[in-house]
């Protein structure tokens, strides 16, 4: 019996590194976490020292080696999932040259405007994405323009999970799903774009080598094996971007199924068998599955909107108590509507200045109306992404896999079924991107002969599903059409 270790490098509000140890049967042997701080030296800045990640990784390895007697003997492979877009810079000594500028850092608005005004059409044609503050290229431009002395010392550019792989192996490389989120990759040609590099004075040799997610990039270095009593033949695989790994961990490999993830932000994503041009309305990236893609729309404040509502109006209640009576409120919340734009919005409006609204407040509305309206507004925002995908692909999603906070409340699950007009399915065990990293290592080790066989072994679903209620579907179609007008009606003020 062998083990694989999936390491997920996150930047949620918890800001932690999670390690999941699994066997070939798809069973979780152990799960360990270690947290680290996010530095915010100025308003809009969000950064971390890459050394934090190494300390957290060492902590997780220590925990596993202490608790699991045969951890070192049986560990066969390691892979990674990680936050997309964040910029890691190394000097010639291969040490961090500057704190990692994270995906949720918003200091780069001017650089995004510069890219889109002088090179926008070309960027979109090559990368299939538009420049947003989260992406890596605007961060590089910010460093060039604001820290030229630092930029002069930059020898290598990396992404966060790849810094962990470098620590384990000494190899500097990345894979296509994370590279696609840099605005530097030619998504179709699967190579760094010389046109973009030349335009923005980035040398090709500053970028990591490109590999497939399931390629072995080397073995764990002897000194690390000795420290944690590993067997000396532990293979390392590049892994993938967190959203791509989460999609794999949900078992989505067909065009009729999509993923709805409601965490702090919300994501609606689907598998793409071939190149699809959404003209920047959605994110479009290479997948961890070779030669495949995935598209995704983002609601910036999904679970965050519900957390804000609770902390502002129901601080003393648990989420369960706050939502326990929303089933008594009819779909549409008796005319009360909420837009979850409390920190701006991404899909489909790409508007950092828009803010949220309650619309249609009436004397008959109770606390439960407001709570239900918040949940409906979050779900409507994700439906915006669903509509774009279905129109472009000329299809209708038959099933949606729901994960995150939205999958924990049965009333919200039924609401999703009715608003999305699709069957809603939940995972038996929700391990997220870390599970996807384990699956990549398992595939790379040759444990399975196909992605389908891998998924059958590692991904299981709850028997109980939620199906659309026709009368609710009709009500929500009317409400959603009205809800869509709120953005245009409120954006100017």
Image: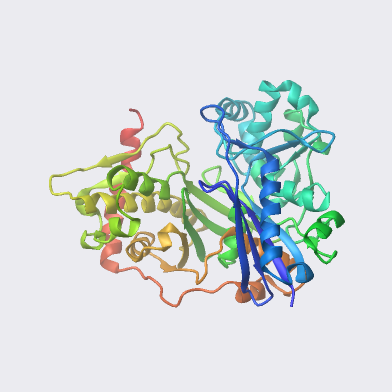
State whether residue 132 is above or below residue 215: above
Q: Residue furthest front?
A: 66
Q: Nearer the viewer, residue 455 or 482?
A: 455
Residue 302 in sight in this render: no
State whether residue 190 is above or below residue 108: below
Residue 177 is situated, as x and y percent measured from the top left of the image, at: 67, 52
Residue 300 is situated, as x and y percent measured from the top left of the image, at: 46, 43
Numbered-mark total: 0
Q: What colour scheme has been applied to the protein in the rendered image?
A: rainbow
Residue 404 in sight in this render: yes
Left/right placement of residue 65 relative to residue 133 reads right
Q: Which quadrant, please, contains the N terminus?
A: bottom right
Q: Nearer the viewer, residue 400 or 387?
A: 400
Q: Which residue is pictured at 42% across the width and 63% down the height?
A: 407
Q: Nearer the viewer, residue 22 or 244?
A: 22
Q: Nearer the viewer, residue 137 or 483?
A: 137
Q: Which residue is pictured at 69% across the width and 49% down the height?
A: 161
Q: Which quadrant, please, contains the C terminus?
A: top left
Left/right placement of residue 401 relative to residue 458 reads left
Residue 226 is situated, as x and y percent measured from the top left of the image, at: 83, 59
Q: Which residue is pictured at 63% across the width and 26% down the height?
A: 118
Q: Residue furthest left?
A: 363
State whether residue 465 is above or below residue 476: below
Q: Which residue is pictured at 86% across the width and 57% down the height?
A: 222
């Amino acid at each position: 019996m062998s083990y694989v270790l999936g390491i997920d490098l996150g930047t949620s509000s918890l800001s932690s590194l999670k390690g999941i140890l699994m066997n070939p049967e798809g069973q979780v042997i152990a799960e360990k976490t270690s947290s680290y701080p996010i530095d915010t030296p100025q308003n809009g800045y969000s950064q971390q020292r890459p050394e934090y990640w190494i300390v957290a990784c060492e902590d997780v390895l220590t925990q596993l080696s202490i608790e699991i007697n045969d951890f070192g003997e049986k560990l066969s492979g390691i892979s990674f999932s990680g936050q997309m877009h964040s910029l890691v810079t190394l000097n010639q000594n291969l040490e961090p040259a500057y704190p990692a500028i994270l995906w949720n850092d918003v200091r780069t608005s001017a650089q995004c405007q510069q890219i889109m005004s002088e090179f926008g059409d070309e960027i979109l044609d090559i990368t299939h994405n538009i420049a947003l503050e989260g992406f890596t290229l605007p961060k590089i431009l910010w460093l060039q323009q604001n820290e030229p002395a630092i930029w002069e010392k930059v020898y290598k550019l990396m992404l966060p999970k790849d810094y962990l792989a470098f620590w384990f192996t000494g190899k500097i490389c990345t894979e296509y799903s994370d590279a696609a989120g840099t605005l530097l990759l030619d998504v179709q040609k699967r190579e760094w774009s010389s046109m973009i590099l030349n335009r923005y004075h980035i040398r090709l040799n500053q970028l990591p080598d490109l590999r497939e997610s399931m390629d072995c990039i080397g073995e764990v270095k002897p000194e690390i094996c000795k420290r944690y009593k590993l067997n000396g033949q532990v293979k390392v695989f590049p892994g993938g971007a967190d959203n791509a790994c989460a999609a794999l961990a949900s078992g989505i490999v067909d065009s009729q199924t999509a993923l709805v993830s409601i965490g702090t932000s919300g994501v609606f994503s689907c598998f793409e068998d071939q190149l699809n041009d959404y003209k920047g309305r959605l994110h479009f990236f290479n997948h961890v599955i070779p030669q495949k893609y995935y598209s995704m729309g983002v609601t910036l404040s999904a679970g965050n909107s519900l957390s804000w509502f609770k902390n502002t109006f129901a601080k003393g209640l648990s989420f369960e108590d706050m939502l326990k009576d929303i089933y008594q409120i009819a779909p549409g919340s008796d005319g009360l509507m909420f837009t979850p734009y409390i920190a701006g919005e991404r899909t489909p409006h790409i508007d950092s200045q828009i803010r949220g609204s309650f619309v249609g407040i009436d004397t008959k509305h109770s606390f439960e109306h407001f709570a239900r309206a918040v949940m409906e507004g979050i779900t409507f925002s994700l439906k915006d992404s669903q509509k774009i995908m279905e129109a472009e692909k000329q299809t209708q999603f038959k099933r949606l896999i729901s994960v995150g906070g939205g999958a924990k409340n049965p009333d919200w699950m039924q609401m999703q079924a009715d608003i999305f007009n699709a069957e809603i399915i939940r995972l038996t065990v929700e391990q997220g991107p870390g599970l996807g990293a384990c699956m990549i290592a398992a595939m790379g080790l040759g444990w399975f002969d196909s992605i389908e066989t891998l998924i059958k072994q590692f991904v299981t679903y709850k028997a109980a599903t939620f199906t659309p209620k026709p009368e609710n579907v009709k009500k929500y179609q009317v409400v959603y059409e009205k809800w869509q007008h709120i953005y245009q009606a409120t954006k100017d003020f």
